[in-house]
Amino acid sequence: MKIYLTLLLVLLSCGPSDLSTDIVIVDVGELDREGIAREIEMIRASEPSVIAIDLQFVERKEHRKDSILASVLRGCKKLVMVSVIEDFTNDKAQYDSLSLPLSDFIVNARIGYANTILEKDDLGTLKKFSVKEVVNGRTEFSFAVQTALAFDSLKTVAFIQSNDR
């Protein structure tokens, strides 16, 4: 299975007093899990504020490569991984199922769903997103919100409180 349009998002900090708000997007292309682990290690060397990975690792591949990636992910200080709400329609009060990455990959990660709300136009334009949803009685935040929470929790909490969904 090839990886298409997969991105690794990183919020980088230049230092404690010189905070950069740059977002660096790294296309992992068709890298295998060991290759992705090497990319993450290089990014970690820059001491990023947050590493947010918009890749869903839901099935086991090669044990050795899975173990390498899991080890690298455990070493990330602020890690956000992606989940998917099953049967997401954005018009339900609650959903039943959340597809999570493999447990080895999310030991110290925040998890945020990647589902989006596409416009009903010819292009399927993305103009808005759901901040939070209820899944199995538990409030889950979007991938973008979890990434923002990891980066600046005070400003993000204010944003969450100002949005009802």
Image (cartoon, rainbow, N blue to C red):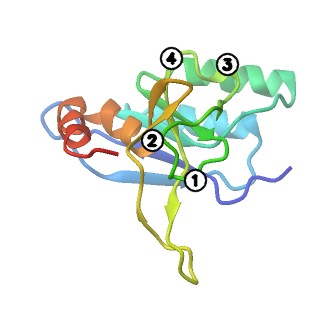
- The numbered mark, 4 or 3, whose residue comes first in the sequence reads 3
- Tell me the distance, in whole angstroms, between the alpha carbons under discs 2 and 4: 17 Å
- Tell me the distance, in whole angstroms, between the alpha carbons under discs 3 and 1: 26 Å
Dot 3: element? helix
- Mark 3 touches mark 1? (CB < 8 Å): no
Q: Which residue in the protein does label 4 denote?
A: 108
Callout 3 crowding tier (Cα within 10 Å): few <14, some 14–19, many ≥20: few
Residue 131 coordinates in the image, percent (x, y): 37, 45
In the image, which is nearer the foreground, mark 1 or mark 2?
A: 1
Q: Which mark is residue 104?
A: none
Residue 119 coordinates in the image, percent (x, y): 49, 71
- Mark 4 touches mark 1? (CB < 8 Å): no
Picture quarter containing residue 32?
top right
Question: Label 3 is placed on what type of residue?
Answer: Ser
Question: Label 1 is placed on what type of residue?
Answer: Thr
Q: Say which residue appears at 54% left-offset and 40% top-offset.
A: 53
Residue 111 vs 129, above or below: the answer is above
